[in-house]
């Protein structure tokens, strides 16, 4: 995702503002920082633009998820429903708080299948955690209804869809809480960083304290703070927040470029009848960081992947079915429960039970899909050439298939 592709004078200015004060920490040192509060400024800017009451910055998208889970009271023995297609951080965060990741199938939206969610609910289910993958939303109407019927929490992992919307609402702001990532390859980057957004005052207060060793931040200085509960050091630094603030101010610029490139590439690929596209539930809300497309069979898809690689044209494309980080098929460490720290045997057994189920419905979708990154840098001509190269490869593979048949 594109943030790091466009980095310039604005980012340097905000970083230099912090360097001139010498105060790199987001809390305390009120006088010495001379009114420079980059983290607070970015939090306020996100809340204002996205229409949520509270934003709290942390050190990564992973710590944002961990903090949000804890702030919502999710922990030992609780089951959290999540998709088979996501980044490994989603289940890492769940295991870090002692919750059981209940993985369920995705559909052609590349997000949670609501019917699969319903079937996975048990007496231990505490939360549904949709992951808005590759710039577009899960079926939030259906998931909200399910959570309402079963009195479940709804936590949005919107780390891959910053700036995307669903029916006019920014992803992350719809459920009880939402999380974002600002790592180096996200839509907006801090270098490393993340955020929790919520409209619940208790979730915000809990997140604020939990991510700073349990400080309640109610004292006149850090030494006067009380610690009403245990917490951890998940703080963002002012330097990271400074980069993020400059990037956030360019969000519409990034989204505009992405949407133009996405539309151009999709129009080129649509000329091939055998190519279909991801079902996007709100086309206007798609942040268009990726274009995800399908071929009729897994065998054909794999042949196209192989040919793109043979022609040195694979760069910027992803075949998630064989990807180590994003799809359950390759998560051997999770499916075997391999950890450095020992897990309780019963807890480990629960994880293994949930992660070694039949995910053939997800396989049927993921094995046929290729996702193409939408960069901010190519010219229209370069994007045209990229699309035409993909089309030529697909046609070559299709022709070879017909001959062999």
Image: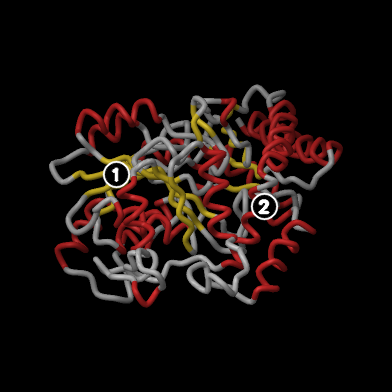
Q: CA distance from mark 2 to mark 1?
A: 32 Å
Residue 229: x percent and y percent? Answer: 24, 66
Q: Residues within 10 Å of mark 2 (few under 14, many from 20)?
A: many
* Location of residue 382 in the rendering, given as x and y in whole percent from the top left corner: 83, 41
- Check disc 1 and report its element: helix, strand or loop: strand
Image height of 380 relative to 58, above or below: above
Q: Residue 184 location, x and y as percent?
A: 62, 60
| Percent position of residue 306, x then y | 64, 48
Residue in view at x 49 percent, y 64 percent: 59
Please tell me which residue is depicted at 16% across the width and 40% down the height of the picture: 122
Q: Which residue is mark 2?
A: 247
Going from the N terminus, do you reach mark 2 or mark 1 first? 1
Seen at 74% across and 38% down, the residue is 257
Task: Examine the rendered structure and indicate whether residue 329 appears above or below residue 271.
Answer: below
Q: Is residue 180 left or right of residue 117?
A: right
| Quadrant (top left/top right/bottom left/bottom right) for the C terminus | top right
Packing grade of label 1 (10 A; few <14, some 14-19, many >=20) is many
- Which label sits on residue 317? none
Picture colour scheme: secondary structure
- The numbered dot on residue 81 is 1
Q: Quadrant of residue 252?
A: top right
């Amino acid at each position: 995702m594109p943030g790091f592709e466009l980095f310039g004078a604005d980012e340097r200015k905000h970083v230099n503002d912090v360097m001139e004060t010498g105060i790199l920490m987001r809390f305390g040192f009120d006088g010495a920082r001379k009114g420079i509060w980059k983290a607070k400024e970015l939090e306020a800017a996100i809340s204002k633009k996205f229409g949520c009451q509270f934003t709290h910055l942390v050190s990564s998208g992973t710590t944002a998820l961990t903090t949000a889970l804890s702030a919502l009271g999710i922990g030992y023995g609780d089951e959290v429903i999540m998709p088979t297609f996501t980044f490994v951080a989603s289940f890492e965060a769940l295991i870090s708080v002692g919750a059981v990741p209940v993985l369920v199938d995705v559909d052609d939206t590349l997000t949670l299948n609501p019917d699969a969610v319903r079937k996975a609910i048990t007496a231990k289910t505490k939360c549904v955690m949709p992951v808005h993958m590759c710039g577009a939303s899960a079926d939030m109407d259906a998931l909200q209804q399910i959570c309402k019927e079963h009195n479940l929490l709804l936590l949005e992992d919107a780390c891959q869809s910053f700036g995307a919307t669903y029916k006019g609402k920014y992803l992350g702001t719809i459920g009880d809480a939402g999380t974002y990532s600002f790592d180096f390859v996200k839509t907006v980057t801090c270098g490393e960083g993340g955020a929790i957004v919520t409209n619940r005052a208790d979730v915000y207060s809990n997140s604020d304290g939990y991510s700073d060793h349990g400080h309640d931040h109610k004292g006149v200085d850090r030494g006067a703070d009380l610690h009403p509960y245990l917490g951890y050091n998940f703080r963002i630094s002012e330097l990271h927040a400074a980069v993020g603030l400059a990037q956030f101010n360019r969000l519409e610029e990034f989204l505009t470029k992405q949407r133009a490139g996405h539309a151009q590439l999709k129009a080129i690929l649509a000329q091939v009848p055998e190519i279909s596209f991801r079902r996007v539930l709100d086309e206007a809300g798609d942040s268009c960081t990726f274009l995800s497309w399908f071929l009729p069979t897994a065998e054909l898809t794999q042949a196209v992947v192989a040919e793109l690689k043979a022609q040195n044209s694979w760069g910027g494309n992803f075949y998630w079915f064989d990807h180590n980080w994003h799809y359950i098929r390759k998560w051997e460490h999770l499916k075997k429960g391999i950890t450095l720290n020992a897990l309780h045997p019963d807890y480990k057994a629960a994880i293994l039970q949930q992660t070694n189920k039949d995910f053939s419905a997800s396989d049927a979708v993921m094995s046929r899909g290729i996702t193409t990154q939408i960069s901010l840098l190519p010219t229209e001509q370069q994007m045209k050439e990229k699309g035409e190269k993909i089309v030529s490869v697909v046609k070559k593979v299709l022709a070879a298939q017909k001959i062999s048949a």
